[in-house]
Image (cartoon, rainbow, N blue to C red):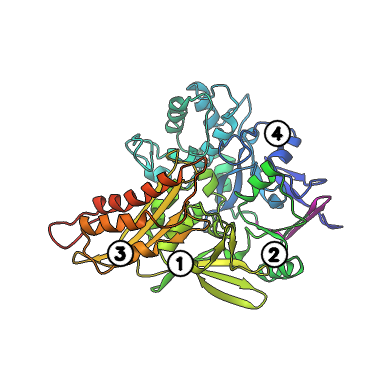
Amino acid sequence: MRPGQRLSVTVNGTERELAGVEPATNALDWLRGLGLTGAKEGCAEGECGACAVLVARSDGASGTEWTALNACLLPAAALDGQEVVTAEGLGTAAQLHPVQHELAVRGGSQCGYCTPGFVCSMAAEYYRDGRAAEAGPGVSSSDAPRACGPNGFDLEALSGNLCRCTGYRPIRDAAWALGQPSGDDPLATRRTSAPPQATATRLEGRTGTYARPADLAEALGLLAEHPDAVLVAGSTDRGVEVNLRGARSPFVIGIDRLPELRQLTATTNGVEIGAVLTLTEVERALAGQVPLLDQVFPQFASRLIRNGATIGGNLGTGSPIGDLPPALLALEAVVLLVGAEGEREVALADYFTGYRQSVRRADELVRAVRIPLPLACTTAFHKIAKRRFDDISSVAVAFALDVVDGMVQRARIGLGGVAATPVRALATEAALEGRTWSAETVQRASEVMESEGTPLDDHRASAAYRRAMLGTALQRLHAENVPDGEGTTHE
């Protein structure tokens, strides 16, 4: 840290200094170094949830929300000035927290390795504002995107927590047995107060520097001084690189709390989404305004990851298998880049230039993404992966079509996992536009779609399988949006 600067985090109600911490140290290792060993490292990449902790975040208004995050991915320095609660801070052996009590009495702890992570994710949902309003008959179908119990507890809150003993039924029973927080519950009371403010932070160590600027102007100034700096928001991708590949950078800029990048505005012409709003925040703020994204969110990793992951990060990494780019391509999104020379707009279709490369200059960052309105009438997102949820896609296809009087007036199709970058299926779009929305048209267009991109053989899928999935995706879309009599379609 800089001379005279004192970095600290409030952990379980006690202020703890970030003294002697290296910039690359993750929050999990730091917490365990304090003796708080409930949170574990199971995978070091945000898949298992054994490292989950609660962090105080804004509820989008004037209050606080307890948000479950993967401590193994988050830099400890990013918690400067923030409040964290671990499983140890929820209850004691003499007085268990309601979540801990229900897990214990219903046999949900199993071997216990993952239990503290489950406890924290369950506690975040236990304290979720509005849960009581969703109370009603339980929905337990595996096909339901949300499985809410009679107490309103949404089991998707546990989608990022894996129990190695496969004891999911008692865990579900414990979740659905929870009542509402009592009036004297300090964590429930904390929700009515403002969240901790993001503070300008600078932590210098042997391996580099972590800096969190106070505003966008300072961030751009740091980028100008350090053109090779790594930008970090939710750290759901960078954290994996640090943990599993030993990635280190001389200078890291934390942009996750920049107010200029945390706005969401909607007009009659479009929706502009701030680059560092988390996907959970985006989902709640949009509230169904963009149906295609509503299909993406439940398939994007897990709730734990979506609580940290951002649109800006998904575009910034340039991964060809990210879930959001195909959908944003189908929506004809525009990327707003800001740098020392000002702001510029780039169509997402022109943004990617190569494998994990883009037109973004070293002195620029993604400020926001704009989705133009009106939206297409028929949309769908198909993700093919080895696991149904919480997995990386082998192929991702996003559709946005306007079908009027049985004719395809406009077609936009985004693809992921079939080229070095996310791409538009331009040839398939041309094969659809101006033609009837019929089985014959779709069959011909499917054959065209099979030739889109340059798919490779890898451990997730063969090139032949990926091509087959491209063809069947369009046929599936047509089957789910078949003509209603003659001429019109329904969704």
At x 57%, y 29%, the residue is: 115
Residue farthest toward the bottom in the current orientation of the protein:
341
**Whole-number angstrom distance, CA of label 3 to CA of label 2:** 50 Å
Q: Check disc 1 and report the residue beneath it.
A: 333
Q: Upstream in the sequence, badge 4 or badge 1?
A: 4
For the residues carrying marks 2 and 1, which lies nearer the camera in this image?
1
Disc 1 residue type (three-letter):
Ala
**Whole-number angstrom distance, CA of label 4 to CA of label 3:** 59 Å
Q: Check disc 2 and report the residue beneath it.
A: 214
SS for dot 3: helix
Question: Is 102 rendered above or below residue 57?
Answer: above
**Whole-number angstrom distance, CA of label 2 to CA of label 1:** 28 Å
Q: Upstream in the sequence, badge 3 or badge 2?
A: 2
Q: Is residue 201 magenta?
A: yes
SS for dot 2: loop
Disc 3 residue type (three-letter):
Ala
Q: Is residue 334 visible?
A: no
Say which quadrant the C terminus sits in.
bottom left
Q: Check disc 4 and report the residue beneath it.
A: 36
Q: Check disc 3 and report the residue beneath it.
A: 431
Q: Position of residue 232 (x, y in %)?
A: 65, 56
Counting labels gives 4
Report the front residue among 399 and 263.
Answer: 399
Mark 3 surroundings: few (<14), some (14-19) or many (≥20) residues within 10 A: some
Q: Position of residue 413 (x, y in %)?
A: 38, 60
For the residues carrying marks 3 and 2, which lies nearer the camera in this image?
3
For the residues carrying marks 4 and 3, which lies nearer the camera in this image?
3
| Region in magenta | 197-208
